[in-house]
Amino acid sequence: MTEIKISQLMDNYTDNEFFIDEESEVNMDKIKENVIENVSGKKTKIKPAAKIMIAVAAAAALAVGATAAAAVISGQLSDASGSIYNYEVHEDGYNISATAGNQADILTLEDGRLIFRLGDNTTDVTDLIDNQTPYIYAYTNADTGRKSYIVLGGTPEEYCMVDFSYLDGIGWSGYGCMDSIDGNAVSADVEEDVVRISFRKSYVRENGEVHPVEGGWPYHSHFIVFSDGQVTSTDVPDNWRDECMDAWLLNAMLSVDMIDPALLP
Amino acid sequence: MTEQELLKALQKGDTAALEELIRRYTAYVSSIIRRILGGRTEDCEELTSEVFLVAWNSRGKLQEGKIKGFLGSVARNKAFVRLRGLHEDLPLEEGVIFIEERSVEEAAEHTDAAILLEKALSQLEKPHRELFVRHYYYGQTVKEAAEEMQINLSTAKAWLCRGREKLKDILEKEGYTE
């Protein structure tokens, strides 16, 4: 005998008959505004955006190997800068939340100058970066032995930070970009130039040419994640797989089509 | 804009298409969430927004003709997860049925669960179907649903029982496999 949960089976149902003409009691404009701000990246500023996205990627990476069933994964992790993030992966597999506990100011705008701070390092990077020239800070996390890179780029008007490191052999990255004047996300062009090109350069410089391989594990199209092949797609919980594979394909295309080979070392 | 055009625009990353999606389906999505959560308007708005974010992030796998079903399914799941977070159990009347297993060879071609469900539900009289949907889709208690439909509790339970039997019958006949 096979057990069928009726409520679960009803996920395949679409109500076209009973409650279809009900007036919405929610504020549609507010919902629209919320959603559009979220997808266009305008809702969060650079530090929260960067950190939250990093945490989400890490949470996703940590979820690898979890069973496809309804396990809720939660925990805490820290990055090399000492920031602490709480993350939670909900059992529907879609709902992933991450909250930053202790934000570290890595790249800040002070009196019109861009200041990079990490540990004992304080560098005025204003004249060292632009939309094509990254400042790359490579380091090894003393606690974990993990190789990490921070890639900075842009101008005082629009600047970017990419934070990239390894997590147990799985590459992961996150970034946040902001317009220093209004706090909103920077233009797509700056993202393309600073994030993708400079990040790519930094990675290739250290690791050689990257070829996305089967088993790459990006969560989000904004993440450029290169797997070392230790993780396979079958390790990904079922309800995540399609989305992951879509994103992976997107990233494979990005790495091939959107990076100007002339810019690579 | 047709659904096909909407889908194409969404998959190209066009946020105007996302706005259109929200305009078309907010009433539907929020109605599911509101029915499951009760009168928590604030939760309803938050979860409705989350549903559209999920749709956006999953736009690559949305299929023509299945957008509404996808949104409804995500809305239900989010609302039920929220309910569980509030430590409110889902009060389902006999939430499972057991069907005879059939071998893959014996079963006809695997039929889409949505089609089987539609087939089973279409064989119920409309009031019976409504009750089934209220209870098993929207998570209304049998008592609440019975009151709103102005039938007594024992009648409601009998109708639900009939619905389960019909569903079981269809699933077995069609060789439903998960």
Image: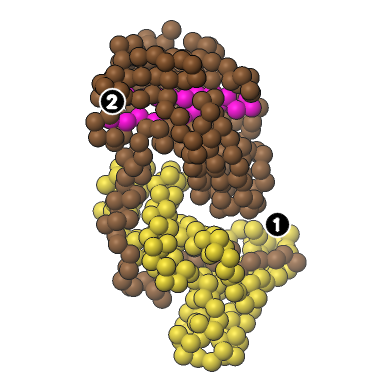
Chain colours: A brown, B yellow
A72 up-or-down from B117: above or below: above
Q: Quadrant of the N terminus of chain A?
A: bottom right
Q: Position of residue B52 (x, y in %)?
A: 39, 53
Q: Is residue B92 above or below residue B6?
A: below
Regarding residue B132, the answer to whether it shows in the image is: no
The chain that hosts pointer 2 is: A
> Amino acid type of disc 1?
Val
User: Which residue is drawn at the image coordinates 30% and 53% (left, top)?
Assistant: A32
Q: Looking at the image, which residue is at 29% across and 51% down?
A: A33
Residue plotted at (39% across, 74% down): A19
The quarter of the rendered structure image containing the C terminus of chain A is top left
- Tell me if residue A1 is in the magenta stretch: no
Is residue B83 left or right of B62 when viewed as pictured?
right
Relative height, residue A184 to residue B67 (above, below): above
Quarter occupied by residue A156: top left
**Magenta span: helix, strand or loop, mainly?**
strand
Q: Is residue B86 visible?
A: yes
Determine the image quadrant of residue A189.
top left
Vertical order, A110 against B46 (above or below): above
Q: Amino acid at mark 2?
A: Glu
**Residue named by callout 1:** B104
Where does the image place residue B66, in percent across and percent down from the top left? 43, 57
Q: Which residues are magenta?
A: A158-179
| Image side of residue A192 versus residue B128, left or right | left
Foreground of the two, A46 or A116: A116
Label 2–label 1 contact, CB within 8 A: no
Front-lying residue, B99 or B75: B75
Q: Position of residue A105 (x, y in %)?
A: 42, 27
Q: Mark 1, chain letter?
A: B
Indicate the position of residue A75 as horizontal and vertical percent values: 61, 42
